[in-house]
Image (cartoon, helix red, strand yellow):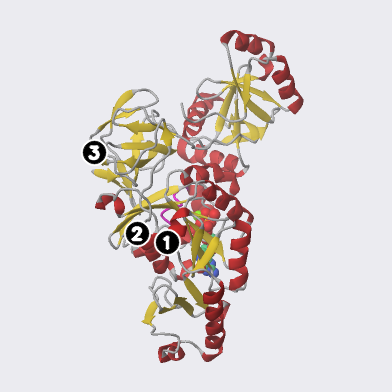
Amino acid sequence: MSDTASNRPELPAEIARRRTFAIISHPDAGKTTLTEKFLLFGGAIQMAGQVRAKGESRRTRSDFMQMEKDRGISVSASAMSFDYRDFRFNLVDTPGHSDFSEDTYRTLTAVDAAVMVIDGAKGVESQTQKLFEVCRLRDLPILTFCNKMDRESRDIFDIIDEIQENLAIDVTPASWPIGVGRDFVGCYDILHDRLELMDRADRNKVAESIEINGLDDPKLVEHVPAHLLEKFLEELEMARELLPKLDHQALLDGTMTPIWFGSAINSFGVKELMDGIANFGPEPQVQTAQPRSIAPEEKKVAGFVFKVQANMDPKHRDRVAFVRMASGHFKRGMKLTHVRSKKLMTISNPVLFLASDRELADEAWAGDIIGIPNHGQLRIGDTLTEGEALRVSGIPSFAPELLQSVRPGDPLKSKHLEKALMQFAEEGAAKVFKPSIGSGFIVGVVGPLQFEVLASRIEMEYGLPVRFEQSQFTSARWVSGEKQALDKFINTNSQHIAYDHDGDIVYLTRLQWDIDRVVRDYPDLKLTATKEMMV
Ligand SMILES: Nc1nc2c(ncn2[C@@H]2O[C@H](COP(=O)(O)OP(=O)(O)OP(=O)(O)O)[C@@H](O)[C@H]2O)c(=O)[nH]1
Ligand SMILES: [Mg+2]
């Protein structure tokens, strides 16, 4: 069902039916709740576990870490695949908190579209703005879901104006809410001329849907309370006059976003959004890579790692690389070239992430996200191909902004701690530096909550209580250059030298002045605040 007015060839049906997208928003807008309802309507789960509900049976599928379950926030992106109508959805739920945004930004390199969730009471929030900008940089198509309409919300025209102005994108209403807060009864589906009525009694129920034949259809009067009907008709007329109509090409170009209104917790508006993703969402797209880009319809298989997660599931104690398939038809048992090491890897036990578990993936097509269990060979940014030396580019790496030193609760467990830290460093969850003098480790992160996540994970996954403490250093710079210049630098600055998990040299300090001095005194060396992921 593609009317993409581009000169791209038609995709094989198996690829064309794939929809790979991320759900993004400011913290707490309702991404995880929405993800649950997607799974529910995709038939992947029977009952949605409420995000903050306690008790074993009612837990969300995407917040799988202990800390996520305890706190009701997402700290890590998680992928899920399921079928909806004739489509295969590959969805990635992302954390909203900015401390975890490196994970979210990387996820955006692996998807073809984003569903932006907005809280109807709050409108465009700071993190919404940042994420939108990242999507716009990549011209990622964006579908908007204005959530929590069951509560008092802001004026709808205000919200739409705010999106248009702050985010510089055209907004077209796909639905229009009727009533607000307690009076909210449902939405008018503008794309299909239907009335969707919300059932407050049963949160997992699909809304009642009533076909409407023109706005003077008596069914409207029958179902919409008189005091809401007049205002609704007025608003709808205004909306139709003032706001652009849905333009599919503009949506695919990322210059127009359709907006649906609903309430994820009440399962309301979710199905319409899913239909929107199916009908208008992009097919798997061309992937930027060096020295050439990769098209999904290419016969040869290629894919890249955008996330690594260790100890995901206590039942499967291993490390899983999340791989976005960029082209071809992958079959289990294939031998693929790991481009960074130029070694062949037999992919014998790839997994599909399903709602409640993982399942062996016998095959995967361009667009899919699969997990490849491995012992550390696969790193973020790695590309797998059938031999060609292609490297997917543009996966971001953030500079560590906060440094702390870490100690095991039991001083005899220092080796264990090292192992745990290395694992997290390879996962990309933190930067780990081993100072050349003295013992102990220094950990660098983007936001303070990451220290908490690390402490909790080291304890849960390695049975090792740890303490994070203030470090004498506040900044880290990777140092590279000719061996001779490097050796001289290391010898004269040994108090400041550390090694990261790859053994690369890092300069630690607390003074910008120090960094300026090194730059001035060692013109042959290069100092960088981030380390390129791609090798
Ligand atoms: N009233 C109301 N509350 C909702 C709705 N959807 C979600 N919530 C609540 O909003 C809170 C946050 O929901 P989550 O789904 O965890 O939000 P999130 O965007 O995944 O949060 P982070 O991953 O931490 O950024 C929870 O308490 C939900 O129950 C809704 O439609 N109406
Ligand atoms: Mg969440």
Element on which disc 1 rests: helix
The foreground one among 254 and 103 is: 254
Residue 61 is one of the magenta-drawn residues: yes
Q: Which residues are magenta?
A: 58-65
For mark 3, what is the residue? 332
- The disc, 3 or 1, on the residue closer to the chain's N-terminal end is 1
The foreground one among 371 and 279 is: 279
The residue lying at 59 percent from left, 62 percent from top is: 164
Q: Residues within 10 Å of mark 2 (few under 14, many from 20)?
A: few
Count of numbered marks: 3
- The disc, 1 or 2, on the residue closer to the chain's N-terminal end is 2
Q: Specify whether 98 is left or right of 248.
A: right
Q: Looking at mark 1, is its residue's CB closer than 8 Å to ligand 1?
A: no
The residue lying at 51 percent from left, 25 percent from top is: 501
For mark 1, what is the residue? 248
Q: Looking at mark 2, is its residue's CB closer than 8 Å to ligand 1?
A: no
Residue 275 seen anywhere in this rendered image of the structure: yes
Element on which disc 3 rests: loop
State how far apart marks 1 and 2 are (Cα): 8 Å
